[in-house]
Amino acid sequence: METTNKKQIISGVGVNWNPWHGCHKTSAGCAHCYVYRMDGKHGKDASIVTKTSGFYLPIAHARDGSYKVPSGSQFATCFTSDFLLEDADAWRGEAWRMIRQRSDCEFFFITKRITRFLQCIPEDWGEGYPHVTICCTVENQAKVDERLPVFREMPIARKLIVCEPLLERIDLSAYLGDWVECVSVGGESGDEARVCDYDWVLEIRRQCIEANVPFYFRQTGANFVKDGKHYQIKRSLQHSQAKKANIDTGKR
């Protein structure tokens, strides 16, 4: 994948495709889940998983017979759920068929359930569809040590590590290598956001440089510490402040 596409994936540029909605909290990073937060504002229970009206978006056609989503688009997949969620087992096969059909586009999803991956792939998966990027998220050292050894061995063509929300100082160095395309780091958003310390971010950056793995600082989070000082950062500024730090390392 070219560097530009990596940045687009990390920044969330593309078409949002949520074939199902809702999830179950599974680790510390889920505590202040934005899906639960947003659904709660509308009186909805985000733990109830439902197939959405946009399920068939990738293969939807316009009146002239062309796809509504044009060739070359990037589908941000299941950002209001988890693509490997148990509740979606009955629907996932059809989702994979649409993904296979739209090989002219790119698909990416972030998961906290990488240990379920082999149970969830289609028969023709092989070493991975080349147009599918899978991002494994880790928020603390316990999840680094639990998920990354599994993620590293999975038959996936394109792999990204997402350290978000970053909740503590973590060491990725035992797992980094040519198998991962890049590492993205970000703090937690929302009124209840836990601290993200800039020193933790820089430590991951150092580990990535030593392993020759591209590094991206995606967002500061709402509760940010730098040089021992606390900053409350508005949601609208969290991405731009991370970009202003100018610490992304880019392509290998």
Image: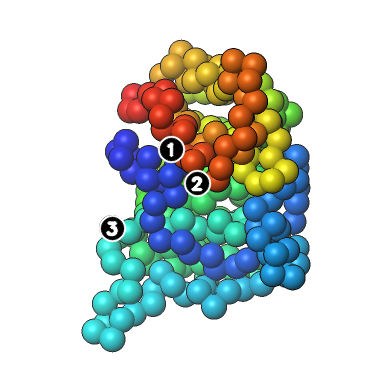
Decide: few, some or many residues near mark 3? Use Cα within 10 Å; few <14, some 14-19, many ≥20.
few
Say whether residue 50 is left or right of residue 93: right
Between disc 3 and disc 2, whose residue precedes?
3
Q: Are marks 2 and 1 in contact (CB under 8 Å)?
A: yes
* Quadrant position of residue 101: bottom left
* x and y percentages locating residue 3 in the rendered image: 32, 36
Residue 88 visible (yes or no):
yes
Q: Is 223 drawn above or below residue 212 in the view shown?
A: below
Q: Amino acid at mark 3?
A: Gly
Residue marked by disc 3: 72
Decide: few, some or many residues near mark 1? Use Cα within 10 Å; few <14, some 14-19, many ≥20.
few
Q: Amino acid at mark 1?
A: Ser
Residue marked by disc 1: 240
Q: Amino acid at mark 2?
A: Ser
Q: Residue furthest bottom?
A: 63
Between disc 1 and disc 3, whose residue precedes?
3
Which residue shows up at 58% across the image and 20% down it?
A: 226
Q: Are marks 1 and 3 in contact (CB under 8 Å)?
A: no
Residue marked by disc 2: 236
In-front residue for pair 12/190: 190
Q: Residue furthest left?
A: 64
Q: Is 38 drawn above or below residue 245 in the view shown?
A: below
* x and y percentages locating residue 212 in the rendered image: 41, 19
